[in-house]
Image (spheres, helix red, strand yellow):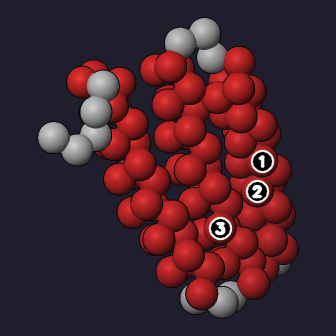
Amino acid sequence: MSADILYWSIAIAQVLLAVAMAFACLRMFRGPRAQDRVLGLDTLYVNSMLLLITYGIRVGSPIYFEAALIIGLLGFVATVALAKFLMRGEVIE
C-alpha cells in the first residue's frame, strides 16, 4: 500500500512540476521586462532540478541527484551573472 502511495505521489508531483515549467517558459518568453525573463529562467532551473530529483527517487538511481546538484550550482551562478549584468551593464569589472 505505501509503495502505491509513493508511486502516485511522485507521478502527481512530476506532472505538477511539468506544468510549472511550462508557466516558467511562458514567463521567460513573454515577459514584458528583462527582470521577468530572468525570474522565469530562475524558476525554470529550480523546477528542472526538482523534476530530476523526483525522477531519481522514482528510478532509484543516484546519478540524477548529482545532475540536479550541477543544475542547481550552474543555475545560481547564471542568475547572479544576469542580475549583475542587468544592474551594471557588465558582468566582469
Q: Secondary structure at mark 3?
A: helix
Mark seen at residue 52 = 3
* Residue at 53% across, 50% down: 46
Question: In front of the other: label 1 or label 2?
Answer: 1
Residue 17 is situated, as x and y percent measured from the top left of the image, at 71, 48
For the C terminus, the quadrant is top left
Q: For this rendering, which residue is in front, 51 or 72?
A: 72
Q: For this rendering, which residue is in front, 2 or 19?
A: 19
Q: Amino acid at mark 1?
A: Ala
Question: In front of the other: label 2 or label 3?
Answer: 3
Crowd around label 3: few <14 · some 14–19 · many ≥20 (10 Å):
many
Q: For this rendering, which residue is in front, 52 or 88?
A: 88
Residue 82 is situated, as x and y percent measured from the top left of the image, at 39, 36
Q: CA distance from mark 2 to mark 3?
A: 9 Å
Question: Which mark is first along the chain, 1 or 3?
Answer: 1
- Residue annotated with mark 1: 18
Residue 5 is situated, as x and y percent measured from the top left of the image, at 78, 68
Q: Secondary structure at mark 2?
A: helix
Left or right, residue 11 beside residue 33: right
Contact between marks 1 and 2 (CB within 8 A): the answer is: yes
Crowd around label 2: few <14 · some 14–19 · many ≥20 (10 Å):
some
Q: Is residue 1 above or below residue 89?
A: below
Q: Is residue 8 above or below residue 25?
A: below
Mark seen at residue 14 = 2
Q: CA distance from mark 1 to mark 2?
A: 6 Å
Residue 2 can be seen, yes or no: no
Residue 81 can be seen, yes or no: yes
Mark seen at residue 48 = none
Q: Amino acid at mark 2?
A: Gln
Q: Amino acid at mark 3?
A: Leu
Left or right, residue 60 beside residue 50: right
* Residue at 80% across, 71% down: 7
